Amino acid sequence: MGLCKLGCVPWLLGILFLSSLELLCMADVHYYDFISNFTRLCTTKSMLVVNDSYPGPEIRVHRGDTVFVNVHNHGSYGFTIHWHGVKQPRNPWSDGPEFVTQCPIQPGTNFTYQVILSDEIGTLWWHAHSDWTRGSVHGAFVILPAPHETYPFHPPDADQTIILESWYNDDYLELIRNSTLDGQAVGIPNAYAINGHLGDTYDCNDTIFRMEVNYQDTYLLRIINAAMNEEKFFSIANHTLVVVAQDASYVTRFATDYIMITPGQTMDVLVHANQNIGQYYMVMRNFHDSAASSNNNLTTAIFQYKNSVGGPRNNASLVSLPEPDDSNATSSFLSRIRNLRVRQNPPLRVPRAIHRRVYIAISTNSIPCTNDSVCITEERFVAALNNVSFVFPVIDILQAYYKRSINGVFTKDFPLEPPEYYNFTGDLTVLNRNVTMGTKVVMLNYGEAVEIVFQATQFGAGGSHPFHLHGFSFYRVGSGSGNFNNVTDPKSYNLVDPPLINTVHVPASGWVALRFFANNPGVWFSHCHFERHSSWGMDTVFIVKNGGTKATSIRPPPASGMP
């Protein structure tokens, strides 16, 4: 368990979020205002935030630490917190997805999360996991090398968290509630933000994030895509980015002019401040390969050398950044990410002999509106995996599974392949209406070698998807265009140095293959990290059974109880 060498400073997650790095480190409890007003684009709104800040405060620990976070809900509705990318060995009780591993923390109550780190290293993040509250409730989770460890590269002179975000003038909960009521998609964001600032490309906005740097110093940027529904390109004018880690796992270093990062992912990037002293734009914009609407405006921040004067040396529009629909730039970038085989990384254990194969077709769907709905049209949007649209229960799945005395919460019959095969990537101009609504899960035996293939389809607007699996990191062993062929495509798998990640880009009109060992018993959510798709039902749950010993079984629930 990690020691509180920097002191146990209490900080609050919108709602009182008290963190200590060791159970014995005691700290005073402080209370704050939790609903704060923010003005952007000439519009002021109240927003649930952390410690009166947007984005929220950073947790900074060492590899292998255990973190206890006591969350007091002083808001007006229930919510949960998820520790994105933390595997939580045998501890699904603190994973956080609402109605999957816990019920919401109700107003006026509290719950202490035990966040157990294992081999993660680098940058992860935390965020709310209830409806759309993660839009304003999120922050960085930085995992430094253990005291006896070093970086597999020359240590940076400093590091800086860069969080890429969506900005809506409207309240997040009102957006999703109205969408649920009228059956339509939530509108596109009014703007985007870098560390809470919209930059200088939007009207009526005077805040821009500035990162001050020293000439010839090297900086580690910890980049997090916290956007609600958008994959992002990111670049810094006149500077080379050197990618060194993704999703808290080191990768073989490579230099690039830009990165592409999908919602939920994190990326660690080295930047050498070796240009003429001045100010340079940091720029992001959407990668968008769908027929759906998108706000493709540039969003800016400033990479500012100390003692520089004047404004940026370049025009933001001239920064080397791919076009919004440049899928070749995306696939080219992703193909360069390889696992770094060094002692600072977990040993490479790519499953070879597969025990369980799951082939999942992703689709956007529609169903008839019910009589109690106020739909704009006669149908409403839903989304599905293998034609099953996930329905959240009213009792969390983990409690029902663990106690084994609560029936009717979920069924164990999620289909392991699509109910029918067709040209998934053909010109499908209609929405898939052959949908079943249900809380269906996949059961896995402890220790099984699992392969999951996600297949994108052209139903609805088509497009790519970012998929996240709780409780695991997995190897991205293959990806391609068109329909997956289970005979020929595995021959091109990378089983030598595939990246170890927790969130994966599923290419539009294509597929991606993942492998992992089911060695973490528990109830683990898997979902699209486009929030609109997840809220429509593009989700499922994997339950890994106990392995027969105490060390291979789910830990007991917290003695103080669950929400």
Image (cartoon, rainbow, N blue to C red):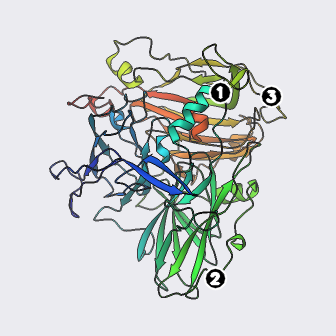
Looking at the image, tell me whether mark 3 or mark 2 is earlier in sequence order. Answer: 2
The nearer-to-camera label among 1 and 2 is 1
Is residue 226 positioned above or below 549 on the image? Answer: below
- Where's residue 320, x and y in %? 70, 70
For disc 3, the marked residue is 430
* Crowd class of label 3 (few under 14; some 14 to 19; many from 20; radius 10 Å): few
Closest to the observer: 484 or 387?
387
Residue type indicated by callout 1: Gly
Numbered disc 2: secondary structure: loop
Numbered disc 3: secondary structure: loop
For disc 1, the marked residue is 183
Looking at the image, tell me whether mark 3 or mark 1 is earlier in sequence order. Answer: 1
Residue type indicated by callout 3: Val
Looking at the image, tell me whether mark 1 or mark 2 is earlier in sequence order. Answer: 1
* Crowd class of label 1 (few under 14; some 14 to 19; many from 20; radius 10 Å): many
The label on residue 101 is: none
* Crowd class of label 2 (few under 14; some 14 to 19; many from 20; radius 10 Å): some
* Marks 3 and 1, how far apart at CA: 17 Å
Which quadrant of the structure image shows residue 149?
Answer: bottom left
Is residue 28 positioned above or below 178 on the image? Answer: below
Residue at 55% over, 31% down: 177
* Left or right of residue 368, residue 536 in this image: left
Residue at the limit of the structure toward the right, as seen here: 427
The nearer-to-camera label among 3 and 1 is 1
The nearer-to-camera label among 3 and 2 is 2
* Marks 3 and 2, how far apart at CA: 48 Å
* Marks 1 and 2, how far apart at CA: 47 Å
- Where's residue 152, x and y in %? 44, 68
For disc 2, the marked residue is 313
